[in-house]
């Protein structure tokens, strides 16, 4: 593009130069024919002015073209720089794809995503990672519930699925899709055989965690054949988005059980309070009887005390009267 623009500018300059040369030639020729002729002199002056304007326009045009060329060169350099960065990003993406070709590395990324989802949705005490069964099998994660343990597998083989996406012809796509379906069924069978074991305390279902939504949609859209195949073997197929909702459902169940346990504790506490209240009522009744008996005893004591005081007072009065009567004759004799 740059070379073409330069060629066009050069051609324009050549054409303008030829035109200017022809004009100069005509001017000189007319000047030689009759230098003393006033009309020719005026014509020569006008042609000279026209030549000057023409040259000035050519200079301005050249300047504008040079500026545009400079801008174009700057833009081309920027585009080249951006293309270089895009090539670098593309190279990094290819390196990352090569990095992900290892099944173990892909499995590690899938397990990390599974761990994040479990940590966000469930309390830590309700799940374990890399759980080992007594028979030696190790599952990527397991959820602990009152009804049993729910195993979760996150190591789905992606090779044939990736090849199916990259296939250019329909025949190749169909071939890799068939292999993908076989991989899926084999993996479902392996999960059911390895992890669904009542002797290990598991429930009658397990999760197959697919690390990509595109794989999940391929399973669901496959005329429900693969989805139903897994369901018949008690394996629940899930993607990152659907698995989170499964976990929220489990969490609601745990919260419901917790609320039920709290309700039982509250009822037990109320029964205890009612029993203690009844016992306190009996104690208060006995205490009331004792208080009433004490009050009666106090009344009886007061009555006895009053009677005794009256008797003592009567005795004192009687004794004083007798003493007074005994002393009265003696006083009369002395008089």
Image (cartoon, rainbow, N blue to C red):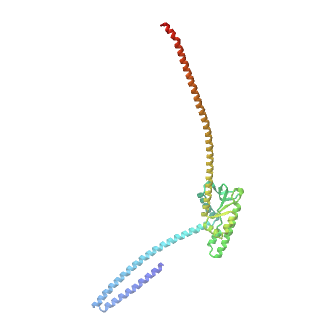
* Of the pair 161 and 150, the residue shown nearer to us: 150
Above or below 266: residue 141: below
Relative placement, left or right, of 132 versus 334 is: right
The residue that appears at 34% across and 85% down in the rendered structure is: 50
The residue that appears at 57% across and 29% down in the rendered structure is: 299
Relative placement, left or right, of 8 versus 305 is: left
* Location of residue 20 (image quadrant): bottom left
User: Quick check: can you spot residue 288?
Assistant: yes
Q: At which x and y percent is residue 262?
A: 61, 50
Q: At which x and y percent is residue 51?
A: 34, 84
The residue that appears at 29% across and 88% down in the rendered structure is: 42
Above or below 87: residue 153: above
* Location of residue 300 (image quadrant): top right
Outermost bottom residue: 33
* Of the pair 167 and 39, the residue shown nearer to us: 167
The residue that appears at 47% across and 80% down in the rendered structure is: 4
* Location of residue 243 (image quadrant): bottom right
Above or below 41: residue 115: above
Q: At which x and y percent is residue 124?
A: 61, 55
Relative placement, left or right, of 199 versus 19 is: right
Outermost top residue: 334
* Total count of labels: 0
User: Quick check: can you spot residue 35?
Assistant: no
Q: At which x and y percent is residue 165?
A: 62, 71
Above or below 198: residue 65: below
* Of the pair 294 and 137, the residue shown nearer to us: 294
């Amino acid at each position: 593009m740059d070379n073409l623009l330069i060629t066009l500018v050069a051609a324009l300059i050549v054409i303008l130069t030829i035109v200017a040369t022809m004009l100069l030639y005509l001017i000189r020729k007319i000047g030689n024919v009759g230098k003393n002729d006033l009309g020719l002199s005026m014509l020569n002056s006008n042609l000279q002015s026209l030549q000057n304007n023409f040259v000035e326009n050519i200079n301005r045009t050249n300047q504008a073209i040079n500026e545009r060329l400079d801008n174009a060169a700057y833009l081309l350099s920027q585009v080249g720089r951006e293309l270089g960065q895009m090539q670098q990003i593309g190279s990094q993406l290819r390196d990352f794809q090569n990095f992900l070709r290892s099944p173990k590395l892909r499995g590690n990324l899938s397990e990390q995503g599974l761990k994040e989802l479990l940590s966000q949705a469930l309390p830590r005490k309700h799940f374990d990672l890399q759980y080992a069964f007594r028979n030696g099998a190790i599952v990527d994660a397991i959820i602990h519930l009152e009804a049993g343990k729910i195993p979760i597998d996150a190591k789905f083989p992606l090779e044939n699925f990736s090849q199916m996406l990259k296939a250019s012809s329909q025949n190749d796509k169909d071939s890799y899709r068939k292999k993908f379906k076989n991989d899926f069924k084999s993996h479902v069978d392996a999960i059911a055989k390895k992890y669904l074991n009542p002797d290990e305390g598991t429930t009658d279902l397990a999760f197959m965690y697919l690390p990509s939504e595109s794989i999940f949609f391929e399973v669901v859209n496959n005329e429900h054949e693969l989805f139903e195949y897994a369901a018949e073997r008690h394996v629940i197929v899930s993607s990152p988005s659907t698995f989170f909702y499964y976990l929220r459902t489990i969490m609601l169940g745990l919260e419901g059980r917790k609320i039920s346990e709290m309700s039982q504790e509250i009822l037990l506490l109320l029964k205890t309070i009612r029993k203690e209240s009844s016992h306190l009522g009996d104690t208060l009744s006995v205490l009331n009887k004792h208080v009433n008996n004490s009050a009666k005893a106090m009344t009886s004591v007061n009555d006895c005390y009053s009677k005794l005081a009256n008797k003592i007072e009567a005795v004192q009065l009687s004794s004083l009267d007798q003493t007074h009567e005994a002393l009265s004759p003696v006083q009369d004799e002395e008089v």
